[in-house]
Image: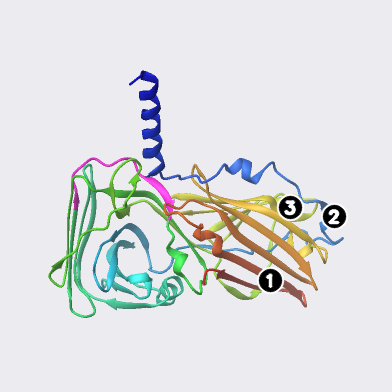
Amino acid sequence: MTLKILKIISISFLLIILNSCIVIRESSFNQDRYLGKKIENPVGIYSNKSQKNSFLPIMDFYPHGNVRGVITKLMLVEFKNHPEYYMIELQEVTDGDSIGMEALIYGHNNELIDIYYTNHLVLNIKGYESLLNKVTIQKTDFEANLALSSNGLSASLSLKDKNGKAIELEIKENKKVKPAKGILAPIGNVSKNPDKFSFIFLKGIIFIKQKGTEFSLKIDGKDFAMAKIPLLFDYEKVYNAKYSFDNVMIDWNSNIDGVINVKKIDNNQIIVPHETWNYCIKRNNDFIEIDSITTTVNNKKFVLHFSPPIPDLACLKDETLLEGKFAVQIDNITAIVGGNYKVKTENNTVLFDMQFEKGWQPMPGKLWLKDYKWTLALKQNDGKYNIKTYWINMKN
């Protein structure tokens, strides 16, 4: 066999391996190229009157609020062949000086999710119902642990489910783990009636290796095996189990139906603080436009960029139609998600839509984000601005 043929075989074999391997991509596109050069809105889109030094805060970005406090650690483990359950999620929550645990037990097809939590925690039941649809929530005492060392994860869970069946889980990694990467969790994929977009970026996600990991799961005294990902994941064989101890969780644009209050700003002001986030504005003559929005969660900086800037919605001419793009960045990780926005004015009403277009997911198929769309309707009436916003998941 000639050297040339051997090289061809080697290259072909390498291509087969690469094509059967999932590699995490923190940035899913080129953000600068996607947003393009800084485009300016033409002044001609505006009416003759500006609301000089008046600003409308049209969006909100709160820390994720399904549980009071901060979810500092989490783990998800899928397993096989149980007639009722297929996944366990374990969370450690810090609330002031207290630490509590949540255990979410997922039924097949996510048709029912049972949530157990310890006495220290305060849960937002409506928030969980909006995000996960059908849930049961029970306060109970159970034993759980999530810890990380140089050799990886140590995790345990011991509880009795709502039917009195014992669930006993033990996981211990025994090999040095690779540096963590970040992915956006598809937690909102199943939500039928979202009242916000839960942006859950697992900045420190690690998939559990098959080699060197000790695992035990018993439910009602029977053993169950951890599910495996059939392809290589970052060039290694891993279970369909992952954990993250470094997370950015934001509830983006909660549904609103009411009056929005105008904020008065100074002549030279370029940052407009509002609650826990900041609007970075640009002035187009006297019209105030939104160039980006920033907030900080868990010591991580979240930035939402717009191109061109969102126009001054209160001052647009009737029958105006504009389009633009947006992208999300966290710290130095750009292009986590991206999408399009559209602005349309008719009959003294402004309609503003945002829809995701770009993102990365490990599973093949249609990008789950594309089904999410946010709409804002703004109308001025007797000097007041009435606003209605809502999300829809077009998959449902």
Amino acid type at mark 1 = Ala
Residue position marked by numbered label 1 in the rendering: 377
Q: Nearer the viewer, residue 95 or 145?
A: 145
Badge 1 or badge 2: first in the primary sequence: 2
Residue 67, located in which quarter of the rendered image? bottom left
Residues at marks 1 and 2, CA–CA distance in whole angstroms: 22 Å
Residue bounds of the magenta highlight: 172-184
Image location of residue 147, percent across then percent down: 23, 53
Residue position marked by numbered label 2 in the rendering: 44
Pointers 3 and 1 in contact (C-beta within 8 Å): no
Amino acid type at mark 2 = Gly
Mark 3 lies on a secondary structure that is: loop
Q: Residue furthest top?
A: 3
Q: Nearer the viewer, residue 292 or 176?
A: 176
Amino acid type at mark 3 = Asn
Answer left or right for 310 relative to 85.
right
Mark number for residue 267? 3
Mark number for residue 296? none
Residues at marks 3 and 2, CA–CA distance in whole angstroms: 22 Å
Q: Is residue 176 magenta?
A: yes
Q: Is the residue 290 above or below the residue 56 in the image?
A: above
Badge 3 or badge 2: first in the primary sequence: 2
Residue 224, located in which quarter of the rendered image? bottom left
Q: Categorize mark 2 by other alpha carbons within 10 Å: few (<14), some (14-19), many (20+).
A: few
- Residue under the image location 21 percent in, 42 percent down: 175
Answer left or right for 316 relative to 58.
right
Q: Nearer the viewer, mark 3 or mark 2?
A: 2
- Residue under the image location 83 percent in, 63 percent down: 317
Residues at marks 3 and 1, CA–CA distance in whole angstroms: 28 Å
